[in-house]
Amino acid sequence: MKRRIALAAALVTLLPLAALRAQPAPREPARLAAERVPTSLAPEAFRLRRERLMKQLGPGVAVLYSKGEEDRDGFKSDPSFYYLTGVDEEGAILVLAPGERVYREVLLLRSVDPEAERWVGLRGLIGDSLRRALGFDAIQRLSALDAVLLRDLAHQPTLHMIAGPVATGAPLPPESDLYTKLQARNPGLAVRNFQGAIAAMRQVKEPAELARMEKAIAVTIAAQRAAARAIRAGAEENWVAGLIDLEYRRGGVTRPAFPSIVGSGLNSCILHYPSHDHTIEDGALVVVDIGAEYDHYAADITRTYPASGRFTPEQRAIYELVLRVQNACIERVKPGAFYEDIHRLAEQMFREAGYRDDFIHGLGHWVGLEVHDAGDRGRALEPGMVLTIEPGLYLISRKLGVRIEDEVLVTKNGHRLLTEALPRNPDDIERMMRGE
């Protein structure tokens, strides 16, 4: 909490009072769609996910570690671990044993450390109140892991690998090390591969997940509007990024889904431009690629703005081409379609316009617990999937980059543009920059 308060205070000190007064009041309608979303899912939602997974696994034992990371907003658990448990605690372990009669799932947590908790906050003691809060009948400390595994493996001597695939150059996950040691000490243990099971579940969003994503989108739209009003020749990229962060805090989001991208001029051609250390020049285009996170669920929206408030004829021509491609691709989003085919349509349209070599990235990605969420691009689209459609052109010699990114929900009869409340038409972009 102290870290968050300090960050907010630091942002406010960056903003001159006169400029803060000059900012128009936030447009509340952009937030109303998901305004009343609870700040966390009920334990029952996570229990049902574990039940669905165990039905796929069958008899055997699966182990999943909370492999998260610490950032300026605190510890964030591995998305798949959180998806199954709702637990954001470093070092936690989930053991699933679908063949057991009574205790088919066990959550193991670190021991309580009173000295450490005086610095980082109190943690719950194991008891019925903690069991109810987390939705687990069996919660133990990490020291019990060996005993839990030996008990479960005695009844069902198979290990299920549910941790996600790992690249050849990446370190082995703790699950792999644990399984290797168990096999060495218990000859005959088999390992079955279910590494894609959790990703496949995560790819189709539940209604409660969509509500959180729409809340994150609403706050991101408010931040895009704030950026649009602030962008002008002479403004600092960092100033715009600071306003975006302030709007996130104002909207009550958990944290940014990823570091904001505010790139002007030549920087608009750098896809993941990180610096924000340039002054916006007159006549430049500014790419703003941002996303808030609400209760672990991400948003991702990109808009391109003219620093002068009006697109030049050249800029408008490129912008309208990118918009035509985006609209054509969005129209292809429906059940049974394939992402790869939609991507190829974008390639074809840019090739016919003479700009294929300037389209240098994928057309989009899944969104959910991660901004680039788990999922298989070779899987046919199904209702409940959410993906971005984000064509872009990057003309380095002209210092001209344009990207337009929106989130699309696959529905039973087609699709719904989740980010529709934020203008995309160039005339509407110019009006938004004027605060209209």
Image (cartoon, rainbow, N blue to C red):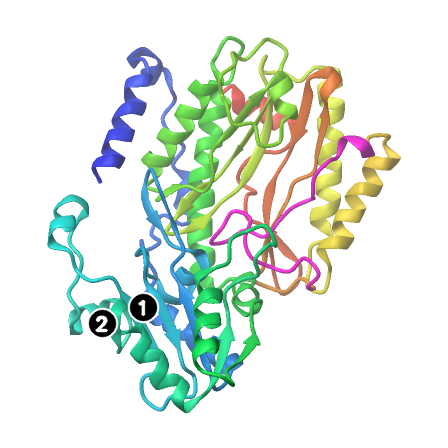
Secondary structure of the magenta portion, mostly? Answer: loop
Check if residue 365 falls in the magenta segment. yes
Q: Is residue 336 left or right of residue 145?
A: right
Q: Is residue 201 above or below residue 435?
A: below
Give the quadrant of residue 424.
Answer: top right
Q: Is residue 228 left or right of residue 140?
A: right
Neighbours of disc 2 within 10 Å: few (<14), some (14-19), many (20+): few
Q: Specify the label residue 43 is tagged with.
A: 1
Is the C-beta separation of discs 2 and 1 under 8 Å?
yes
Q: CA distance from mark 2 to mark 1?
A: 8 Å
> Circle 2 sits on which residue?
132
Q: Look at 48% across and 12% down and name the residue there.
A: 235
Q: Look at 73% across and 16% down and name the residue there.
A: 398
Q: Is residue 252 left or right of residue 59?
A: left
Q: Position of residue 419 (x, y in %)?
A: 55, 43
- Amino acid at circle 1: Pro
Q: Look at 56% across and 23% down and name the residue there.
A: 263
Neighbours of disc 1 within 10 Å: few (<14), some (14-19), many (20+): some
Residue 285 shows in this picture: no
Q: Position of residue 127 (x, y in %)?
A: 15, 72
Give the magenta part as a residue range. 356-379
Q: Look at 48% across and 37% down and name the residue there.
A: 221
Say which element carries label 2: helix
- Is tag 2's residue or tag 1's residue first in the polypeptide sequence? 1
Residue 226 shows in this picture: yes
- Amino acid at circle 2: Arg
Instruction: Please identify the quadrant where the N terminus is shown.
Output: top left
